[in-house]
Image (spheres, rainbow, N blue to C red):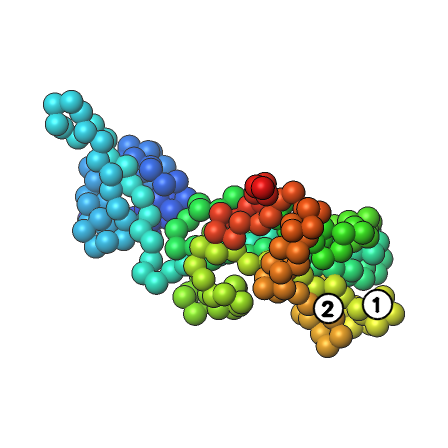
Amino acid sequence: MRVRPSPAKQIIDLVKAYPGITRTELAAMLDRSYWSIRYWCDKLEKEGKIKAKRIWTVRHTVRRVEYYPVKPPGVYYRTQVALMFYARVPRRKTPDPIAEFRVCVVSDKEGMYDIHKLERACLYIGVILAPQTYWIKQESIVTAREIDEPIDPDELELSVPVYKRLNYAERYACFFRSRRESSEWWRNEVPDYWEYEEAPVPLPRKGDYEYDEKYIKAQEDTLVKAKFLKYRFDNRRGEMVAVTE
């Protein structure tokens, strides 16, 4: 008698990839019968590995069942965007980094923050700290994004080190030392730069100018009071909002 292998892992992976997937869709994707998928889904639901949402008809019968992933216990979600500014476009040698701006937030639910709003806030870091905007006139700007990356709770303080709060975005900026001082270090640190799909983020060194959320917020408040800025960063919403009189 031929025994087919368990499709449990495949079902869990598909539910994670396509939240709201139905039994019929699972059966078609896994080339199994509807009743086989029903058996395994009911089993996984009882074990707490997936959760089901039953759609009822007006006559109180189940019309279809949708399946959703279960959030692992003790898991948070990190969303962040980083902008790296380079002195020149990468060609034969590793370019010299001029500055890095970053916005990071850790949430207890997925989908709470819009990466595009965080990216706009990232650009405003430069407006706050260096209004002459020399940083945006560089030849090369590389963007790195991370959206709802599951992390362990002990990574919270590392991701948002100043206030260490859930659902509270923090900003960070680093202006790197002069080209003469940074070139040799940067090339030695990342010799295989060209193989990266996203720019590796250099670690701050002694002499670099670093600014955390507390400092950036203080500078922002000063510029708002001076009516230089028309927008300020809302840390809980993770977006720039208009300043009200």
Q: Residue at x 70, y 64 (%)?
A: 174
Q: Quadrant of the C terminus?
A: top right
Tell me if I can see residue 71 in this picture. Answer: yes
**Earlier along the polypeptide chain: callout 1 or callout 2?**
1
Q: Give percent across and percent down for residue 153.
A: 41, 66
Left or right of 32 on screen, residue 226: right
Residue extending farthest to the top is: 58
What number is the disc on residue 178? 1
Q: Quadrant of residue 93?
A: bottom right
Residue 172 visible (yes or no): no
- Which residue is found at the position 21% from the left and 35% from the top? 54
Percent x, y for residue 115? 55, 46
Q: Nearer the viewer, residue 226 or 31?
A: 226
The x, y position of residue 178, in whole percent, is: 84, 67
Q: Say which residue label 2 marks.
A: 209
Q: Residue at horizontal 24%, vertical 38%?
A: 53
Which amino acid type is shown beneath numbered disc 2?
Answer: Tyr
Q: Considering only vertical position in the picture, is 156 above or below 226? A: below
Judging depth in this view, the residue of 127 and 55 nearest the camera is 127
Query: Residue at the location (28% across, 32% down)?
Result: 24
Outermost residue on the right side: it is 180
Q: Amino acid at mark 1?
A: Ser
The residues bearing labels 1 and 2 have C-alpha atoms spaced at a distance of 11 Å
Q: Secondary structure at mark 1?
A: loop
Nearer-the-camera pick, 31 or 99: 99
Question: Residue 244, how many percent across, how many down?
Answer: 57, 41
Neighbor class of circle 2 (other Cα within 10 Å; few <14, some 14-19, many 20+) is few
